Amino acid sequence: MSFEHLFQPIKIGNLEIRNRIVMAPTATHFENEDGTFTQRGIDHYAARSKGGAGIIIIGCVTVDTRARYFCSSPCAWDDKYIANWRLMADAIHEGGAKLFPQLMHPGPIDPRPGICVNASRVPVPTLMPEVWGDPHELTIPEIEQIIDDFGEAARRMRAAGCDGVQFHMAHGAYALTASFVSPILNKRTDEYGGTIEGRMKFPLECIKAIKAKAGDDFPIIVRISGDELDPYSRTLNETFYVVNMLEKARVAAIEVSGGSCPANGWRVVPINGLPMALNAQYAEEVKKRTKLPVLTVGNIRTPEMAEYLLESGVADMVSTARAFIADAEWPNKAAGGRLDDIMTCCGCVGCNVLLNNNKSIGCTINTDCGKETKDTAIIPAEKPKKVLIVGGGPAGLEAARIARLRGHDVTIVEKNEKLGGQLNLATVSPSKQSLTLITKYFANQMKQLGVNLIFNTEVTPEFVKECKPDAVIIATGAQPVVPSSISGFDKKNVVTAWEVLSSEKKVGANVAVIGGGAIGCEVAEYLAGRFTRPFTKGRIEVTVVEMLGGLAAGLDFGTMAHHADLLGEYGVNVFLNSKVKEITDDGLIIDMDGTEKVLTGMDTIILAMGSKPYDPLSERLKDIVPEIHVIGDAKEAHTAMEATHDGADVGRLV
């Protein structure tokens, strides 16, 4: 594929960009406590510039000394930050990309009293679901100060050598500027409220201040939601008028996103199961009505999709964050025809889970993400070894890839007929098809690198003796937890979620799922969503019993909310804060907040209570092999991201 549109230069204002590829903004937590970039953060973005990005937008840049997004974001509220930003700009320019910091004020999503501010005092759920922000309604002098803050921040960015700025006014309550524009959140009756012209006064004055302080020739890319998709919020038709006002304000380009927070935050950072290029329809309609360059953003994961969006006239540029998290070099690989070498984002949002837990960003498929400061180059082994890897799941596959790149002779033995391990179960859920991209990438790499693959084989000590390896890596995964502490766990009507998802066991018309974690939600959605269609006979009634106070604990906020939405849509009965006391012949006895409740009429009970490590070999191989490593779920049951990183570490160590 030639990608003749993707790699055409384009002008944003008077600035020439080398191609049509934008690294979209995302938090990274690669900042010091004082809001300066660490070397790790500089190297992270520099790698994406060298990898072929045309523009890099660094997200959530604080313009107000008090209001830091996530309490960890880069700052631009004082001249003392200029020198640090200059280091970032120089590093990005060296790779050939242009730098656009994204200026924003978090406004109502910062729950801290006195810092949570908005156009009006309308409470909103914040990024922490258990906390509701009670915003202070900004006074006119306070509004004028924030407008000046935006202008001053832009001045500093130009002084630091940045090429332009992005102005964030998308996603409803997600940021202060969009909140002013929102008819749901802006109830003011003064000059900054009422009509759309009044609600737009604040962002337009911010843009005016940016131009006054940084220069009229300093390009501004404005991010908006094409449609906020929230009842009584801004629709696409109103967006056309907003874009017309922005064009008259002489901004340089429009980036069209979609959705709003908190109404559909799972769509703002697209989770598994959402359509590709899900905001393209809004960008296409906006592009018909403006002369400005239009960027489209949202679930654009492959260069082929990006090329199509440009070729078909949907947009002038494509903007993607997670494609760059998954592979810093995907533009260069696409330009060089190395499509099979691209680590395509699988949509697992593991990166967002880390951010939600106040950790630095990382990636399931790209184990080098966030480690660019360290020497991530593959160092050839001093003495190549014969390495036997038991298990072809994500941990074993990444260990094999790294070990083979280092020069080892690597063999993977998988007891089933295909690679992937537990990923093959995870992808059965209707919304998880994109997880197949992990296994697809690794399968291509195994073929290219010449890793030996043996399927349908159970490894025994005798097998290992015959192979005579120098090292064995045990990546045998996990097994589902079967709770012997619950009376009735061994009844004939009890199956595991793994058995259902692998089609080993069928279920009846009325089922209960014990456990509302990720796999519990997934098996419930699979049964309730797939088997209630018009062409199926009857309906599967599903009940989920979860001992915690919420579903899908440990996942990112958007995915947790989406699971709750889907289960509600499918009519799944959910009991939270409920502990199973007994499994009966036709149901469950549960303790629901201290009250006993009997559930009856159930044909099948599905156990979805987590997993436990499965390692049948390490002890038995101690006297046979000089070097043994246990990795992934075989060592400790955890996420796919932790598994691949575990495999990478051992691949470098072996």
Image (spheres, rainbow, N blue to C red):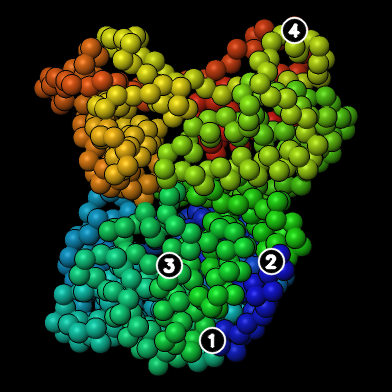
Q: Given this view, does label 3 or label 2 mark the residue nearer the observer? A: 3
Q: Given this view, does label 3 or label 1 mark the residue nearer the observer? A: 3
- For the residues marked 4 and 3, what is the alpha-carbon distance in whole angstroms? 56 Å
Residue 166 is situated, as x and y percent measured from the top left of the image, at 48, 75
Say whether disc 4 or disc 2 marks the residue closer to the N-terminus.
Answer: 2
Residue 72, relative to residue 646: is it above or below?
A: below
What residue do we see at 71% from left, 18% from top?
628
Say whether disc 4 or disc 3 marks the residue closer to the N-terminus.
Answer: 3
Nearer the observer, 196 or 180: 196
In contact (CB < 8 Å): disc 3 and disc 1: no
Badge 4 amino acid: Glu
Residue 288, relative to residue 410: is it above or below?
A: below
- For the residues marked 3 and 2, what is the alpha-carbon distance in whole angstroms? 24 Å
Q: Which residue is mark 4?
A: 462
Residue 149 is situated, as x and y percent measured from the top left of the image, at 39, 78
Helix, strand or loop at mark 2: loop
Say whether disc 3 or disc 1 marks the residue closer to the N-terminus.
Answer: 1
Say whether disc 1 or disc 2 marks the residue closer to the N-terminus.
Answer: 2
What residue do we see at 33% from left, 16% from top?
494
In this orientation, does residue 62 appear? no
Q: Which residue is mark 3?
A: 279
Helix, strand or loop at mark 1: loop
Say whether disc 3 or disc 2 marks the residue closer to the N-terminus.
Answer: 2
Q: Which residue is mark 1?
A: 218
Residue 505 is situated, as x and y percent measured from the top left of the image, at 41, 21
Badge 1 amino acid: Phe
Badge 1, how many Cα within 10 Å: few under 14, some, many 20+? Answer: many
Badge 3 amino acid: Asn
What residue do we see at 74% from left, 47% from top?
375
In contact (CB < 8 Å): disc 3 and disc 2: no
- For the residues marked 4 and 2, what is the alpha-carbon distance in whole angstroms? 50 Å
Badge 2, how many Cα within 10 Å: few under 14, some, many 20+? Answer: many
